[in-house]
Amino acid sequence: MAEKRKKDPRLARAGVSGYNKPKRTPSHPKKLHVVVAKEGSKIKTIRLGEQGAKTAGKPKAGESERMKKKRASFKARHRRNISRGKMSAAYWADKVKW
């Protein structure tokens, strides 16, 4: 008989449906998103994004030059941390928020 695999308790604690699936946490006092990152056998819970930040978000139709510059500035400033991959908050912030 095939044994049922137990669901990782970190997924339930974070309230996400699976590994590498970010979720908004509007009721969290400080952070806006949570993700349980998995790379190989390493697993890590990452919280990211400032609650109430107005500058981050996907590009909007007719976005101003100022917002485009902010977006480019974020990516340039965090490029090294973004390139660290799935185990860094910067990677997920870039993917989810910017």
Image (spheres, rainbow, N blue to C red):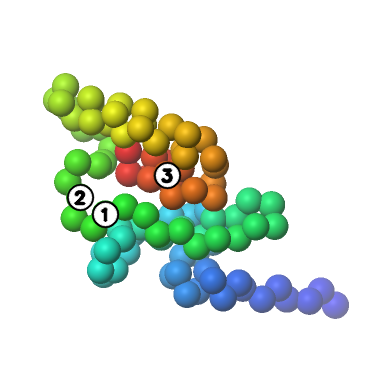
Kindly indicate whether the residue at mark 2 contacts the one at mark 1 (C-beta within 8 angstroms). Answer: yes
The residue that label 1 is drawn on is 50
Please say if 22 is above or below 82.
below
- Label total for image: 3
Please say if 36 is above or below 2.
above
Going by the numbered disc 1, the residue's amino acid type is: Glu
Q: Residue 62, can we see it?
A: no
The mark found on residue 42 in the picture is none
Residue at x 29% of width, y 29% of height: 73
Q: Residue furthest right?
A: 1
Residue at x 56% of width, y 75% of height: 9
Res 3 → quadrant: bottom right
The residue that label 2 is drawn on is 53
Residue at x 65% of width, y 57% of height: 42
Res 64 → quadrant: top left
Q: Which quadrant does the C terminus fall into?
A: top left
Going by the numbered disc 3, the residue's amino acid type is: Ala
Q: Residue 3 vs residue 49: left or right?
A: right
Q: Residue furthest top?
A: 65
Kindly indicate whether the residue at mark 3 contacts the one at mark 1 (C-beta within 8 angstroms). Answer: no
The residue that label 3 is drawn on is 90
Going by the numbered disc 2, the residue's amino acid type is: Ala
Q: Residue 59 vs residue 33: left or right?
A: left
Crowdedness of circle 3 by 10 Å Cα count: few (<14), some, many (20+)? Answer: many
